[in-house]
């Protein structure tokens, strides 16, 4: 029996485990999925889609088989200023306020998650997990229906408008996700940094605020912006509870136009487009910042 | 009992330390006088680093006692911050604060912890950086410095707290051979200035040159100790002999 020498008289092979590069999608860290996906859309794509959708009225028109009417795009053109200034700006206001409230609460909750006090740490952990993993709409309903519509303070009646309750309701899941961002970012700083600070007689609080947080604040910005884009995309759910934001006003506009069926797709398609126009630059910026910060530190 | 300089500045007595069921230190004792330079050597895993981390209470101990300037380190009521103002430590991986410049790294603890005057601290910090031969690197970030330069910044950072004792935990182990020397020279300068130094090191030549006393540890106990001349040339214990024969 002849023995072959691998590489000389036989094909070179090895019994040693060889690690082949696994095929994987490029640039998709799990935490920023949404922004990466959104930013990967070519900027012209939604406009093309909108043009295609605009052809819908001609299809609907053919079906109704009817007389001459003003075109759907003409109707939309009339409503656009109203939908943007009254509707979408209000949506933006809700999302910004929600983000502010959610961030403030989330930072405290995130710091609570790394508290040396077991009770605070445990409570923060569970609050984070519960709000992070609950359906947003259910949280919104609970807040909307359990909060009073007005409060009495020193004899004054202060009304609480629905939209402020919506802001609070939406800020709960945002809070929980910001809490995770804070906890994760602090955890990503090597423990040797804590030790170095400890050996220089820094207290725990000084270490956290002067050494650990300044190092990871940059790392928190991309995921934080990612959550802002997700939140903005999610704000239309408050329309279910009667808040007069862009989706609600669009429905009302269609009703004002006698509920013509050919209006549906162009109008709602337009709403889709303004959400895209607003969130797309944010997503691009998020991805850009993520890559920029990934290079440093 | 108040401490006077004729007593050991660091006194370690029968210290025991275990991580779970793994006993790392099995009764270690040593006395270190002010101004002495001590080198602890031994095979890896023999508990050297653990021992010096116990001296500034980064690790706790399960038995025995450690005192610094007469003060028990592992006393529940001890103000650890007070201890750490007296004991400086330099790590193998430098652990500089990456978001601060070299100068800021050195200034941070005196300004924030000791609340000293910023201008005065800056003057001292610049002098310290000069002392570790890093003049001109004040405004560089750690990421822009070589390992040896970072380690010297780390030494200056510890010195800025004006400690009475300095702990060096394998400070040259992560360095390129050509930068090891610049760090060792810095430590030698310190020793010459009378700083009490406790070093864990693998640099035998350096230990021989600079140390007043050498401790050889293996498997959690001190096998042999003595002044460098007797230790290196006239080791008694077979374990020491074997270790030295492998290294030298």
Image (cartoon, coloured by chain):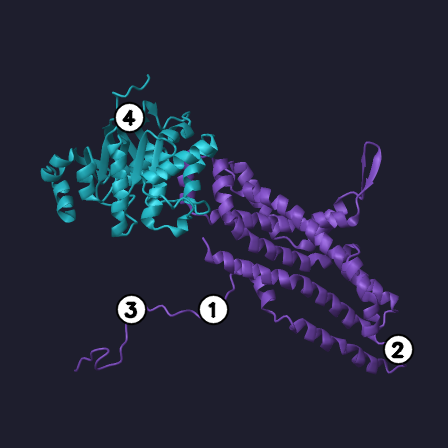
Q: Earlier in the sequence, mark 2 or mark 3?
A: 3
**Quadrant of the rendered structure where residue B195 is?**
top left
Q: CA distance from mark 4 to mark 3?
A: 56 Å
Please tell me whether residue A256 is drawn above or below residue B125 in the rendered image.
below
Which chain is in cyan here? B
Q: Which residue is the site of mark 4?
A: B9
On the rendered structure, is B189 left or right of A210?
Answer: left
Q: Nearer the viewer, mark 3 or mark 1?
A: 1
Color of chain A here?
purple
Mark 1 / mark 2, whichever is N-terminal: 1
* Left or right, B229 with reference to B45: left
> Marks 4 and 3: which is nearer the front?
4
Instruction: Place residue A105 in its image quadrant.
Output: top right
Inter-mark Cα distance, 2 to 3: 75 Å
**Precedes in sequence: disc 3 or disc 1:** 3
Q: Secondary structure at mark 3?
A: loop
Q: Residues within 10 Å of mark 3 (few under 14, many from 20)?
A: few
Q: Nearer the viewer, mark 1 or mark 2?
A: 2
Of residue B141 and residue B130, the one placed in the foreground of this image is B130
Which quadrant: the N terminus of chain B? top left
Q: Which mark is residue A88?
A: none
Rendered view: A182 above or below A81? above
Does dot 1 land on a helix, a strand or a loop? loop
């Amino acid at each position: 029996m002849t023995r072959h020498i691998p590489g000389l008289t036989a094909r070179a092979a090895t019994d040693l485990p060889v690690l082949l590069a696994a095929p994987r999608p490029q640039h998709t860290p799990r935490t920023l999925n949404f922004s990466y996906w959104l930013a990967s859309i070519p900027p012209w794509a939604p406009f093309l889609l909108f043009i295609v959708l605009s052809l819908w009225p001609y299809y609907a028109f053919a079906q109704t088989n009817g007389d001459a009417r003003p075109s759907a795009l003409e109707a939309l053109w009339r409503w656009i200023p109203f939908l943007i200034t009254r509707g979408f700006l209000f949506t933006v206001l809700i999302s910004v306020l929600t983000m502010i409230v959610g961030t403030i609460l989330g930072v405290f909750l995130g710091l609570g998650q790394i508290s040396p006090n077991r009770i605070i740490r445990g409570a923060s952990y569970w609050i984070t997990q519960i709000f992070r993993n609950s359906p947003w709409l259910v949280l919104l309903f609970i807040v909307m229906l359990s909060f009073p519509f007005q409060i009495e303070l020193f004899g004054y009646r202060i009304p609480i408008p629905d939209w402020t309750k919506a802001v609070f309701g939406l800020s709960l899941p945002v809070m929980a996700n910001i809490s995770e961002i804070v906890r994760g970012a602090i955890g990503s700083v090597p423990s040797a940094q804590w030790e170095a600070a400890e050996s220089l007689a820094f207290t725990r609080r000084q270490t956290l605020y002067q050494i650990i947080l300044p190092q990871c604040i940059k790392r928190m910005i991309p995921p934080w912006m990612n959550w802002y884009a997700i939140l903005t995309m999610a704000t239309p759910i408050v329309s279910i509870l009667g808040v007069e934001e862009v989706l609600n006003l669009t429905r009302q506009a269609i009703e004002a136009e006698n509920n013509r069926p050919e209006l549906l797709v162009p109008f709602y398609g337009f709403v889709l487009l303004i959400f895209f126009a607003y969130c797309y630059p944010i997503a691009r910026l998020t991805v850009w910042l993520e890559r920029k910060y990934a290079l440093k530190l | 009992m108040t401490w006077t300089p004729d007593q050991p500045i660091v006194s370690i007595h029968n210290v025991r330390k275990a991580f779970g069921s793994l006993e790392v230190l099995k009764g270690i004792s040593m006395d270190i006088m002010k101004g002495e330079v001590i080198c602890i050597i031994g095979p890896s895993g023999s508990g050297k680093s653990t021992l010096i981390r116990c001296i500034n209470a980064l690790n706790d101990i399960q038995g025995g006692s450690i005192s610094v300037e007469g003060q028990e380190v592992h006393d529940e009521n001890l103000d650890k911050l007070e201890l750490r103002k007296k004991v400086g430590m330099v790590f193998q991986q430098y652990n500089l604060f990456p978001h601060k410049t070299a100068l800021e790294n050195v200034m941070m603890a005196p300004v924030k912890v000791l609340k000293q005057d910023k201008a005065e601290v800056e003057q001292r910090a610049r002098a310290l950086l000069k002392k570790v031969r890093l003049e001109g690197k004040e405004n560089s970030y750690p990421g822009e410095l070589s390992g040896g330069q970072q380690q010297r910044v780390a030494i200056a950072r510890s010195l800025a707290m004006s400690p009475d004792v300095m702990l060096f935990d394998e400070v040259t182990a992560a360095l390129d051979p050509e930068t090891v020397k610049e760090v060792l020279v810095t430590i030698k300068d310190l020793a010459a200035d009378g700083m009490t130094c406790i070093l864990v090191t693998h640099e035998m030549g350096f230990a021989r040159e600079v140390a007043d006393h050498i401790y050889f540890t293996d498997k959690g106990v001190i096998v042999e100790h003595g002044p460098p001349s007797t230790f290196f040339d006239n080791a008694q214990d077979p374990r020491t002999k074997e270790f030295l024969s492998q290294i030298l």
